[in-house]
């Protein structure tokens, strides 16, 4: 479940997607990219360039895009597994090694944003920074070492919900024209203090037995208990034609495996439907595999082979608590939602065309092994 963006940890400038860089002198390349003048006034260039960064527990992802008549065109992108949340569950802190990995990745992002002349952006840090006791100190360190101003958010973003509803359902597109409209249609949301990294650390990720898998599912179901007791969504699911909407991460990986893709193809995965049986069939096959066999799966790879079963366990817990029989897969996430929102706020492309169009050449997204 995705939750509303919180205000904790972010400045007003970060929340409105103003300047991406902290304390940038006007004469620097970053200052030029931001349109900063010595007087403190900022001028928005005629051709705006937007940036969106999603720093999660496992990945660091950046998209840089320009508005187009049909949505936006991605001009640069970056994705790296950094495992920032490694060890947070046991220590309560971000480790020195994980912080160094992450800052190295963020330096690449900062360089890309400067070179592309990003004029407006929003840079989000999620679960790991939110729950770690040294999260705020890490945010300050990132600003000092990379110039990037990260905003810690409270468990997800309405931008992501908005984008997915606009993109995947005709009835939603006809009736919803802004984030407020979407928010009024959302009955409730929550963010669980459990992710693939923490589950894999607790129960193991490489060698996973059926009992290990069931223990992971049980942890997630316990975490969902309070939310379900309060809102009773299971009753609504039983009485309606509800379905899940899954964005990035585990669902795209499961979809790629289900489709038997020789390599991950976003065009095949994005928008496809899975049944609950499809999901469970793939999950059971993965449980039966060794770690080496999961590594050999083209839609998983070695960087995620020890995390994929934790993701399957989370999805299985959701299916048991809310027994939907169908799931719609969306290969897009927080970055695309941020870009769409920033451009809409600036008046770009008021028509209902929100599909991101990625260039085949240049700095667009490269093929990837699902996202999580």
Image: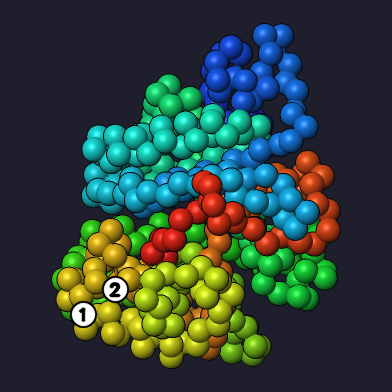
Question: Would you say the residues marked 2 and 1 are in contact, meaning their CB atoms lie under 8 Å apart?
Answer: yes
> Of the residues tagged 2 and 1, which is closer to the observer?
2
The correct choice, above or below, for 264 with respect to 92 in the image is: below
**Residue 33 visible in the current orientation:** yes
- Picture residue at 58% right of the left edge, 45% below the top: 75
Q: Earlier in the sequence, mark 2 or mark 1?
A: 1
Q: Give coordinates of residue 28: x percent, y percent.
A: 55, 15
- Picture residue at 54% right of the left edge, 31% below the top: 115
Nearest the eye: 156 or 262: 262
Nearest the eye: 214 or 167: 167
Q: Give coordinates of residue 319: x percent, y percent.
A: 46, 81
The correct choice, above or below, for 2 with respect to 109 in the image is: below
- Picture residue at 42% right of the left edge, 49% below the top: 79
Which label was assigned to residue 289? Answer: 1
Q: The C terminus lies in which quarter of the figure?
A: bottom left
> What residue is disc 2 on?
297
Q: 10 Å neighbourhood of mark 2: few (<14), some, or many (≥20)? A: many
């Amino acid at each position: 479940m995705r939750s509303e963006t919180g205000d904790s940890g972010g400045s007003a400038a970060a929340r409105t997607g103003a300047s991406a860089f902290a304390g940038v002198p006007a004469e620097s390349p970053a200052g030029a990219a931001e349109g900063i003048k010595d007087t403190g006034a900022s001028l928005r260039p005629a051709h705006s360039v937007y940036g969106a960064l999603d720093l999660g527990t496992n990945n660091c992802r950046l998209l840089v895009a320009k508005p187009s008549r049909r949505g936006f065109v991605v001009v640069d992108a970056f994705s790296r597994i950094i495992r920032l949340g490694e060890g947070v569950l046991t220590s309560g802190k971000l480790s020195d090694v994980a912080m160094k990995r992450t800052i190295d990745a963020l330096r690449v992002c900062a360089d890309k944003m400067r070179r592309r002349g990003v004029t407006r952006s929003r840079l989000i840090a999620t679960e790991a920074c939110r729950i770690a006791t040294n999260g705020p100190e890490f945010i300050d360190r990132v600003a000092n070492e990379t110039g990037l101003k990260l905003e810690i958010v409270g468990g997800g973003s309405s931008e992501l919900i908005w984008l997915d509803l606009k993109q995947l359902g005709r009835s939603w597109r006809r009736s919803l024209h802004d984030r407020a409209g979407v928010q009024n249609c959302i009955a409730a949301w929550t963010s669980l203090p459990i992710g693939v990294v923490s589950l894999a650390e607790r129960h193991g990720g490489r060698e996973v037995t059926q009992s290990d898998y069931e223990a992971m599912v049980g942890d997630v179901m316990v975490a969902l208990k309070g939310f379900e007791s309060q809102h009773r969504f299971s009753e609504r699911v039983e009485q309606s034609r509800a379905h899940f909407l899954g964005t990035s991460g585990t669902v795209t990986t499961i979809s790629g495996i289900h489709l038997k893709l020789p390599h991950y193809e976003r065009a095949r995965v994005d928008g496809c439907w899975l049944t609950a049986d499809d999901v469970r069939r793939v999950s059971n096959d993965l449980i039966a595999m060794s770690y080496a066999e999961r590594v050999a799966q083209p839609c998983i790879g070695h960087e995620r082979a020890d995390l994929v079963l934790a993701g399957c366990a989370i999805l299985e817990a959701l299916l048991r608590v809310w027994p939907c029989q169908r799931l719609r897969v969306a290969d897009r996430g927080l970055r695309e939602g941020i870009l769409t929102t920033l451009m809409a706020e600036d008046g770009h492309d008021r028509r209902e065309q929100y599909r991101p169009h990625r260039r085949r050449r240049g700095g667009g997204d490269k093929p990837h092994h699902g996202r999580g």
